[in-house]
Amino acid sequence: MRALLHPLGYPARFESEVAEPLRIAAESWRSRTCLFDVPPLSVTIHVQDGPVPEGPPQYRALPEGFSLACDRITRAEFSLSARAACLHVSSAALNRPEWFRHQLLECLVLTALDAVYFVGLHAACVVPPKGRGILLCGASGSGKSTLAYACARQRWTFVCDDSHLSPGPENIVTGNTDKIRLREPARDLFPELAGEPTVTAPNGKRCIEVDPAQLPRASAAAPARDCVFLSRRPGPATLGRYPEACAIEYFAGYNTRYNRDSMIQRLRDFVRGRTWLLEYESLEGAMRAMERLPS
């Protein structure tokens, strides 16, 4: 059985002798269309009898690709030169589809795509009504998703909260998730979230999920220009320069390639002259400050 899907808008051919992993892959990516005219990724999935893995896979970067391994049955390998991944999974692991999706399938495919084509950025992306995309950057809990959602409510275009940067001078970014995940305090900021349920995200954290389709404007991809690093503090919002070297270090810290030279050079080119520190208290002040970014 086979399926052609487009994670991150990139063509990927999935093949398995069992229908269930293809069904799970389709749930993740069947809504995505092809955005890039590039050689497809190949993903072969083998299923055999075995127990549920005791923990998440261990990642190992290799000169020719990378590997993921939970145990002797559930494991995966990716070949960089062949653009091909092979995933071996126990039948019991497929009885936990969300675990399989988050810990194995999406981890394998997205890491492979970041190895052959994209650079993962760990940033949300929004586009103001006038201008190019803005990346909202910062450690987990810094408010990236909250500010992105606030921007989207004001008719900015929401792109993603987990940006991946494609090659080329257009600096197109796209994302994997079709949800905006907000922490519980967001209920106090946005009245429409009061009745929304709390769910467990794939990373195990409790959150509120918002479908971008409910927003005034959403897009699967957009050109990005500015990298804005977030810092909450009392007082009026201010926007100042942020060191480019610190921005590169931040983005590189979320990438796991064995050979990192091309990735670092790509980041240098991308951030040059466009890194900012946004210190703010109110979401409205933060948006007004970003609207003043130089064109």
Image (tube, rainbow, N blue to C red):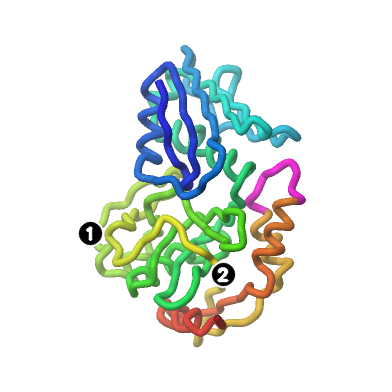
Q: Is residue 222 magenta?
A: no
Q: Badge 1 is on which residue? A: 195
Instruction: Find residue 172 and report its horizontal and vertical position in percent.
Output: 53, 59
Q: CA distance from mark 1 to mark 2?
A: 36 Å
Relative to 158, 191 lies left or right: left
Q: Which mark is residue 165?
A: none
Quarter in which the C terminus is drawn: bottom right
Region of the chain picked out in magenta, as a range: 253-261
Q: Quadrant of residue 25?
A: top left
Is residue 245 positioned above or below 235 on the image?
Answer: above
Q: Amino acid at mark 2?
A: Arg
Is residue 44 positioned above or below 108 on the image?
Answer: above
Badge 2: how crowded within 10 Å, few (<14), some, or many (20+)?
Answer: many
Quarter in which the N terminus is drawn: top left
User: Which element is circle 2 on?
Assistant: strand
Q: Badge 2 is on which residue? A: 225
Q: Amino acid at mark 1?
A: Gly
Is residue 40 positioned above or below 181 on the image?
Answer: above
- Residue at 37 percent across and 21 percent down: it is 19
Q: Earlier in the sequence, mark 1 or mark 2?
A: 1
- Secondary structure predominantly adopted by residues drawn in magenta: loop
Relative to 188, 138 lies left or right: right
Q: Residue furthest bottom?
A: 236
Instruction: Find residue 169 and report its horizontal and vertical position in percent.
Output: 61, 62
- Residue at 39 percent across and 45 percent down: it is 32
Q: Quadrant of residue 77?
A: top right
Q: Is residue 255 magenta?
A: yes
- Residue at 49 percent across and 64 percent down: it is 144
